[in-house]
């Protein structure tokens, strides 16, 4: 089987399983280029995603599309998916037990696509990899995993749409991500981590490129 077939088989298997939220939402599979260098992970589908059964097709998705095209990237070049592949009721946050039930499927999805960079959108996707990390400190940093993959946390586009400072950071971070994706970055992170509500936890070590 090629990657596209393996991914289709994975989502077919998910659809047949009794996963959380399937009693109230359809499966919202990942989509894009199975050979992508960059894999984006959001938190869970919303209303538009559950209607179209596609990730990031509402307002947050429009911002993601714009950020991609502003950086000479296109949606069909990347892979886009969610931690929870369904819509929680009233768009509430996904519950820890829901995230855990979906975990093996996201692990398999990542193992099939094998991206060089995993760009997490929002804290749920970031904490999936880095449980202790705080997004206000870690966004825009490239963090190497033992697997050799790079985790690149971004603010969630929906949060960016609600907050001008987060929008600024989201767009700046996205430029850094695009440079990294094109293999042009030899830079260490240039900015100081921002304080998280007076919490003086050590910043996460960023990897040099
Ligand atoms: N927000 C997400 O986290 N995922 C989507 O697919 C849409 C909005």
Image (cartoon, rainbow, N blue to C red):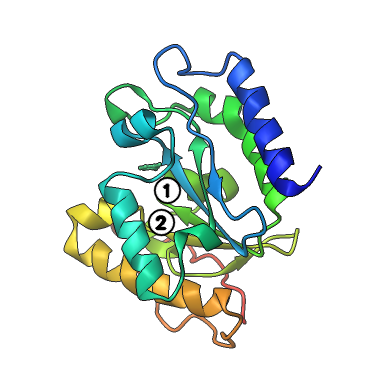
Mark 2 surroundings: few (<14), some (14-19) or many (≥20) residues within 10 A: many
Disc 2 versus disc 1: distance between alpha carbons? 6 Å
- Indicate the secondary structure of the residue bearing disc 1: helix
Mark 1 surroundings: few (<14), some (14-19) or many (≥20) residues within 10 A: many
Closer to the camera, 14 or 205?
14
Q: Which quadrant of the figure has residue 137?
A: bottom left
In the displayed structure, would residue 78 be above or below residue 105?
A: below
Q: Name the spot of residue 124 as percent of width and height, x first.
A: 45, 43
Q: Name the spot of residue 174 as percent of width and height, x first.
A: 41, 70
In the displayed structure, would residue 165 be above or below residue 123?
A: below
Tell me if label 2 and label 1 are in contact, CB under 8 Å.
Answer: yes
Which residue is found at the position 44% from the left and 84% from the top? 190
Q: Which quadrant of the figure has residue 146?
A: bottom right
Asked whether, in this view, residue 37 is left or right of residue 86, the answer is right
List the residue tagged with mark 2. 135
Q: Which quadrant of the figure has residue 18?
A: top right
Q: Quadrant of the N terminus?
A: top right
Considering only order in the chain, which callout, 1 or 2, is on the residue closer to the N terminus? Answer: 1
Which residue is found at the position 50% from the left and 32% from the top? 85
Q: Name the spot of residue 192 as percent of width and height, x first.
A: 40, 77
Q: Quadrant of the C terminus?
A: bottom right
Which residue is found at the position 62% from the left and 65% from the top? 37
List the residue tagged with mark 1. 123
Which residue is found at the position 61% from the left and 74% from the top? 207
């Amino acid at each position: 089987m090629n990657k596209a077939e393996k991914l289709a088989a994975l989502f077919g298997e998910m659809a047949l399983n009794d996963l959380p939220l399937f009693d109230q939402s359809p499966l919202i599979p990942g989509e894009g280029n199975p050979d992508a260098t960059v894999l984006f992970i959001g938190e869970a589908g919303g209303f538009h995603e559950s209607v179209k059964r596609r990730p990031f097709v509402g307002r947050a998705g429009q911002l993601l599309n714009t950020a991609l095209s502003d950086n000479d990237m296109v949606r069909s070049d990347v892979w886009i998916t969610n931690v929870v592949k369904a819509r929680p009721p009233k768009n509430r946050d996904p519950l820890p037990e829901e995230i855990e039930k979906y975990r093996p499927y996201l692990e398999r999805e990542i193992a099939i696509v094998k991206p060089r960079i995993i760009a997490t959108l929002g804290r749920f996707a970031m904490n999936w990899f880095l449980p202790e990390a705080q997004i206000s400190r870690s966004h825009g940093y490239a963090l190497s995993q033992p697997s050799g993959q790079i985790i690149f946390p971004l603010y969630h586009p929906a949060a960016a749409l609600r907050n001008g400072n987060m929008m600024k950071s989201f767009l700046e971070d996205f430029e850094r991500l695009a440079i990294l994706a094109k293999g042009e970055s030899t830079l260490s992170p240039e900015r100081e981590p921002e304080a998280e509500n007076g919490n003086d936890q050590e910043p996460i070590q960023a990897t040099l490129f």
